[in-house]
Amino acid sequence: METDMTERDKGSSALVRKLPLIAIVLVAAVGAFTLRDYLTFDTLRENREALLAFRDENYVATVLAFMAAYILIVAFSLPGATIATLTGGFLFATFPGALFNVTAATIGATAIFSAAKWGFGEKMAEKMNASDGLVRRIKTGIDETQWEMLFLIRLVPAVPFFVANVVPAFVGVSLWRFAVTTFLGIIPGAVVYTSVGAGLGQVFERGETPDLGIIFEPHILLPILGLCALAALPIVLKAVRGKKEL
């Protein structure tokens, strides 16, 4: 009888731990269909004068409201993160707009990471640590190069933001390490898109749309790839040393 109650308690506790991540997934699914037509460049263009007027009269309130909205967009993986970044530049210029964007994105990403780690990550990390053979070697390799790998997945433009938020939770990355690498790793891309947002006034006047492909321009992409190479170098060196030892 006691064993049955214990098993039920464990099952209930496990479900409770998974609820935050389940809620995030559900809200993300609903938001993908209900908000994609609202969190758009056209919406920003149509409301630009009202947003600027409100900012001029209530600067601090605008900052807080903007950051809260950005955090929710990232935390629940809602559509519109790029538009939010552009809006940060449009309302607050490249600086402090980039600071607001990076801070809000980091808080939102940390919320997803924490939900994933609390619900599934800790158990998965424990299983990987208890495994033998290839799984154990993979986990050991990840542990030895966590800082480098975390910076790398943040710097590489091709890695989806949601993936970069969830995967570290499943391999035992600490909250502190995740938050630091997220904040620092997203700065280059955030500064680029925030600067694009800072120039939206002229884009609106010309009736054009912003060039979001600017991050792939050589003068911007090459420095970012250089940072990626620096982050990847320790990983490559450790891999080579490991092969020599074998």
Image (cartoon, rainbow, N blue to C red):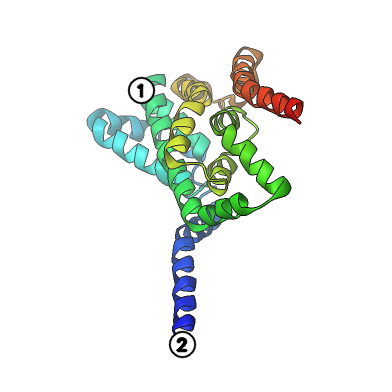
Quadrant of the rendered image containing residue 107: top left
| SS at circle 1 | helix
Percent coordinates x, y for residue 106 in the rendering: 43, 36
Callout 2, which amino acid? Met
Percent coordinates x, y for residue 18 in the rendering: 49, 62
Task: List the residue tagged with mark 2.
Answer: 1
Q: Could one spot residue 76 in this view of the protein?
A: yes
Where is 5 relative to 85, above or below? below
Percent coordinates x, y for residue 5 in the rendering: 44, 81
- Kindly identify the residue that appears in the image at 51 percent across and 53 percent down: 122
Task: List the residue tagged with mark 1.
Answer: 96
Q: Could one spot residue 45 in this view of the protein?
A: no
Q: Is residue 229 left or right of residue 69?
A: right
Q: Is residue 137 left or right of residue 126?
A: right
Callout 1, which amino acid? Pro
Percent coordinates x, y for residue 194 in the rendering: 46, 24
Where is 86 relative to 219, above or below? below
Residue density around tag 1, few if under 14, some if 14–19, many if 20 or more, within 10 Å:
few
Instruction: Specify the label residue 134 is tagged with.
Output: none
| SS at circle 2 | loop
Question: Of the residues under marks 2 and 1, which one precedes in the sequence?
Answer: 2
Question: Which residue appears farthest toward the bottom when viewing the image?
Answer: 1
Residue density around tag 2, few if under 14, some if 14–19, many if 20 or more, within 10 Å:
few
